[in-house]
Image (tube, rainbow, N blue to C red):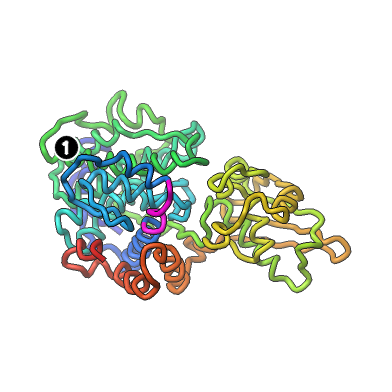
Amino acid sequence: MQTTKPEAAEGGLTGLIANFIAGYDSAVAPQDVRNHAARAFANWFACAIGGSQDESVSKLLAVVGNGDTRQQASVLGRNRRLDMANAAFANAFASNALDFDDMHVPTLIHPTGPVVAAALAVAEYRHASGKALLDAILIGIEVELHIGECLFPGHYDMGWHITATAGVLGAAASACALLNLNRKQIEHALAIAATQAGGLRAMLPNECKNLNVGKAAHGGVFAALLAELGLTSAPAVFDEAFGYFSVFAPNEGYRETLRALGRRHLISGISLKPYPCGVVIHPVIDACINISHHRDFHCSAIRAIEIFVHPRTAVLAEKQDPASVITSRFSLHHAAALALTHGAADFETFEGADIADARLVRLRQLITVHRSPELTATQSRVVVDLGDLGKIDEFVTQATGGPEKPLSTEQLKQKFVQLCRMSMDAIAAERLFERCLSFSELSDVSALCSL
């Protein structure tokens, strides 16, 4: 469905994207899309609050914003305020710290991380309405994911952290919308954001992955604010030589992908995680939890475990002996062992597990991973050999939390409260959850941040 005003898309792809941002009309966005955005916002808010207590966030805040007296926007869960760009930096960083944030499986982008952090910081300082914030989030995520589709998988396979390289543009788009920039200003903001695009996949199994996401949010806000003040840049960054697509080598047909901007809603394809680990592992976890509940299952009887996954899942998560808590979140061996041992893999289970636990080590050593091209990224098959008790064979076609099998409102609420309990009591967390789901009705979103 068309969500832009009937304006001619002038100036090539750069003009097309700028027109989409400047002419966005959420009145024609389907209600289910708006509801999905509200759920994604609530999920991000909880991840940011929960992640705010992580030691890596303390390290960041020891450096960022020191000496700056511009207390423009809130650092969630920290009772601290920074300028807009650095507040976005800190909140995006925190939202990725626990590996519990959302994911768009087709592009492996964490969509809300850069976009919502940027949009909320600007909206809070400018006292924007909830509707304006929702529109900005929809705009930013659609720009981010359409650009991501233009790049994935080649860009990702080269080693770029696509959440950062596409996310900085989504963050800029959302900030531009809230600042009500005109088309020319938006084109400059996109170029200022594009020249900041960066982030290496080598950072994924360590704390610096959070930095990539935070820098994308910061870069987007920074770009929009500079463009608002008249800083000029490349006039057509998506069209010219040595511009964004010239450097980042898009897929064949990427122009058609971008021309679909405003006619489809990729935000509906976002997965909200039930487990705090890499989303490609989730089908394996689902299968293992199902096996653990089988009437013939006894964990001590396991003799061998065979796991069949899409080849990309194995590339990203085949880590038999994770060396740290962070790497354990990217290990399908650890996740499978955890799910089989505990019959669960929620936040408390992951956080409470000792990666050196003898039971987990034993099970990890029994796992053989098979790379199966016939499986999709949302599928897995797990076969557990119980010796004399036989074998249990479990096949998962859609992971819990994905668009085909979304979290229920109650499941999302439980996740929200669990994460927010680090900073408030359960009653306050439940109240905040309801406010987050209905944030689009607020006349001033700064009231939400004050909670």
The total of numbered circles placed on residues is 1
The residues colored magenta run: 49-55
Residue 138 drawn above or below residue 67? below
The residue that appears at 36% across and 70% down in the rendered structure is 429
Q: Position of residue 223 (x, y in %)?
A: 22, 38
Q: Give the residue at x 45% y 53%.
A: 103
With 33 as the anchor, is 392 left or right in this view? right
| Residue 333 seen | no
Q: Is residue 339 visible?
A: yes
Q: Residue at x 37, y 55 (%)?
A: 48
* Quarter of the rendering containing residue 69: top left
Residue 133: quadrant of the picture? bottom left
Q: Is residue 6 above or below residue 423?
A: above
Label 1: few (<14), some (14–19) or many (≥20) C-alpha neighbours in 10 Å: some
Picture quarter with the C terminus:
bottom left
Quarter of the image that includes the N terminus: bottom left
Give the residue at mark 1. Answer: 226
Q: Amino acid at mark 1?
A: Leu
Mark 1 secondary-structure assignment: helix
Q: Please name whichever residue, 84 or 401, is drawn nearer the observer in this view of the structure.
A: 84
